[in-house]
């Protein structure tokens, strides 16, 4: 029973364009959402988060959008850079327990 | 500042053996969590500890156990290893009241 789903295993984007990574969840009790980036042979690195009381959060080139009614969130990266090539994970949590439930990840490839 | 450190980085064990993985959190972080990441999947929550007490346990068999020491470092123990225990084991720490976990680079366990 996958509570957090990332349906695109991979995504290829031209350098300088927008990258949009998507994530769907099924558990309406989730109230905090995070995006992590992972390079090979490294642990995940925290990128950006959003709580369920907001629908948008920005940090530099990264913006996360949350649509609670659709149980959907997305990460926008603008402009995309070669160093953004990595696996991106969406994770969800209930504020009460801090346990992260993860999607399977999307491999983002930025083409020069 | 030192990040989350895990040891060893790689480990090869035989089925039926026991393994101990170690984690040192970032200084000042009292919460430590353990995750298992199998190839091609997102991390799966195993344990969460806060102030030396277990605060959460994922859907893993009793062969998995953990503890947190007074200096907030942590150990994950796995008994009677199975081939399916082969995975990357990630440790993460966070400050009190913050959701953005910082992860270590992981221990790659191979069971043969």
Image: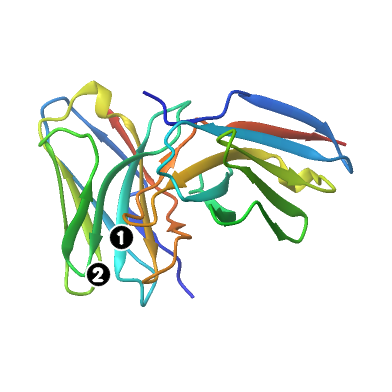
Q: Are marks 1 and 2 in contact (CB under 8 Å)?
A: yes
The image quarter in which residue B84 lies: top left
User: What's the residue at 66%, 25% (across, down)?
Assistant: A10
User: What's the residue at 45%, 66% (across, down)?
Assistant: B3
Depth check: give the residue in front, A32 or A79.
Answer: A32
In this rendering, position of residue B26 left or right of residue A78: left
Q: Is residue B74 above or below residue A26?
A: below
In this rendering, position of residue A38 left or right of residue B101: right
> Label 2, on which residue?
B72
Image x and y of residue A35, in percent: 57, 47
Q: Is residue A22 above or below residue B10?
A: above
Depth check: give the residue in front, B50 or B37.
Answer: B50
Would you call the spot at circle 1 few (<14 residues within 10 Å), some (14-19), or many (20 or more)? Answer: many
Image x and y of residue A80, in percent: 81, 45
Determine if residue B30 is in view: yes
Image x and y of residue A59, in percent: 71, 61
In this rendering, position of residue A46 left or right of residue B97: right
Spatial CA span between label 1 and label 2: 8 Å
> Label 1, on which residue?
B32
The image quarter in which residue B22 lies: bottom left
User: Going from the N terminus, do you reach mark 1 or mark 2 first?
Assistant: 1
Image x and y of residue B24, in percent: 31, 64
Q: Quadrant of the N terminus of chain A?
A: top left
Q: Is residue B15 above or below residue A21?
A: above
Q: Chain of mark 2?
A: B
Determine if residue B68 is in view: no
User: SS for tag 2?
Assistant: loop
| Mark linked to residue B16 | none
Q: Chain of mark 1?
A: B
């Amino acid at each position: 029973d996958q509570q957090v789903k990332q349906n695109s295993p991979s995504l290829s984007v031209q350098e300088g364009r927008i990258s949009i990574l998507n994530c769907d969840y099924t558990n309406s009790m989730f109230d905090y959402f995070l995006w992590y980036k992972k390079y090979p042979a490294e642990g995940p690195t925290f990128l950006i988060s959003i709580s369920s009381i907001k629908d948008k959060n920005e940090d530099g080139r990264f913006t996360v959008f949350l649509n609670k009614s659709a149980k959907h969130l997305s990460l926008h990266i603008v402009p995309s850079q070669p160093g953004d090539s990595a696996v991106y994970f969406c994770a969800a949590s209930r504020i009460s327990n801090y346990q992260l439930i993860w999607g399977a990840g999307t491999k983002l490839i930025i083409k020069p | 500042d030192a990040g989350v450190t895990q040891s060893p980085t790689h480990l090869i064990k035989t089925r039926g053996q026991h393994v101990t993985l170690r984690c040192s959190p970032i200084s000042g972080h009292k919460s430590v969590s353990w995750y298992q990441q199998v190839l091609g999947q997102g991390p799966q929550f195993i344990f969460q500890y806060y102030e030396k007490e277990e605060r959460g346990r994922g859907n893993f068999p009793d062969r998995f156990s953990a503890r947190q020491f007074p200096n907030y470092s942590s150990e994950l123990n796995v008994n009677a290893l199975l081939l399916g225990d082969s995975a990357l084991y990630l440790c993460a720490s966070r400050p009190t009241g913050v959701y953005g976990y910082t992860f270590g680079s992981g221990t790659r366990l191979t069971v043969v």
